[in-house]
Image (cartoon, rainbow, N blue to C red):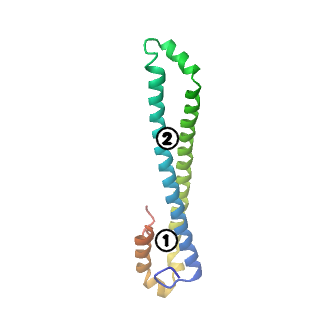
Amino acid sequence: MIFPIELDEVTEVILKRVMMHKKEWNDMKKRMQLSFILFLLSLALFGLYMYQTIVIPHRPSIERMMMALIDDEHTFWFAVFVGSLAWLAFFYKKKSEKAEQDFHALRCEFIQKSNELLQERAWEKRHVLYEWMKKTYDISLYHENK
């Protein structure tokens, strides 16, 4: 038993699923943040590369800059790489939002049905469980709002 009070099997399973969804949401948030940081870093490096290889050597003529841009194969692959990181950040943002919705839906369902799930002894000591969940897993079971 990992919980601070005695719970029936159904309640334990539901609370474990809530904890699992919270962990999944946190993992997706971390992946989204990391991919966004990598995107911004690669975008800055791409801008620096463009400035050094296209703008500075061909400054007097926009036409020569455009020709150099078209002729440089590295620019294309660098742009594909930066675009891929942008797509990855967007992908993880969507996954993070989905994981957050799933977590909050399950948490709210537990809150709504807690008086049915927690038996008489557990209902009297629910504040111990709620405090433990808040402190240990940062999951609030007091109110439905975030």
Q: Which residue is drawn at 57% across and 39% down?
A: 84
Give percent across and percent down for residue 125.
Answer: 43, 83
At x 44%, y 30%, the residue is 48
The image shows a total of numbered marks equal to 2
Question: Where, quadrant-wise, is the C terminus in this rendering?
Answer: bottom left
As helix, strand or loop, the secondary structure at mark 1 comes to: helix
Amino acid on which the number 2 mark rests in the picture:
Phe
Residue 72 vs residue 84, the one in the foreground: 72
Residue under label 2, please give it: 39
At label 2, counting other C-alpha atoms closer than 10 Å, the crowd grade (few under 14, some 14-19, many 20 or more) is many
Circle 1 packing at 10 Å, graded few (<14), some (14-19), many (20+), is: some
Q: In this view, does 39 lie above or below 51?
A: below
Residue 57 figure quarter: top left
Q: Which residue is drawn at 47% across and 88% down?
A: 121
As drawn, the label of residue 27 is none
Depth check, mark 1 against mark 2: the one in front is: 2
Image height of 65 relative to 131, above or below: above
Name which residue lies at 55% across and 16% down: 67
Q: Which mark is residue 111?
A: 1
Instruction: Find out whether the residues at labels 1 and 2 contact each other: C-beta distance under 8 Å.
Output: no
Secondary structure found at label 2: helix
88 left or right of 143 in image:
right
Please state the horizontal and vertical placement of residue 131, each as a whole percent of the image.
Answer: 40, 75
- Give the percent coordinates (x, y) of residue 16: 55, 72
User: Which amino acid, by three-letter code, is at mark 1?
Assistant: Ile
Position of 19 relative to 75 (above/below): below
How far from the left and from the top, in percent, is residue 86? Answer: 53, 40
Q: Identify the residue at the far bottom of this view.
A: 121
Q: Is residue 65 above or below residue 90?
A: above
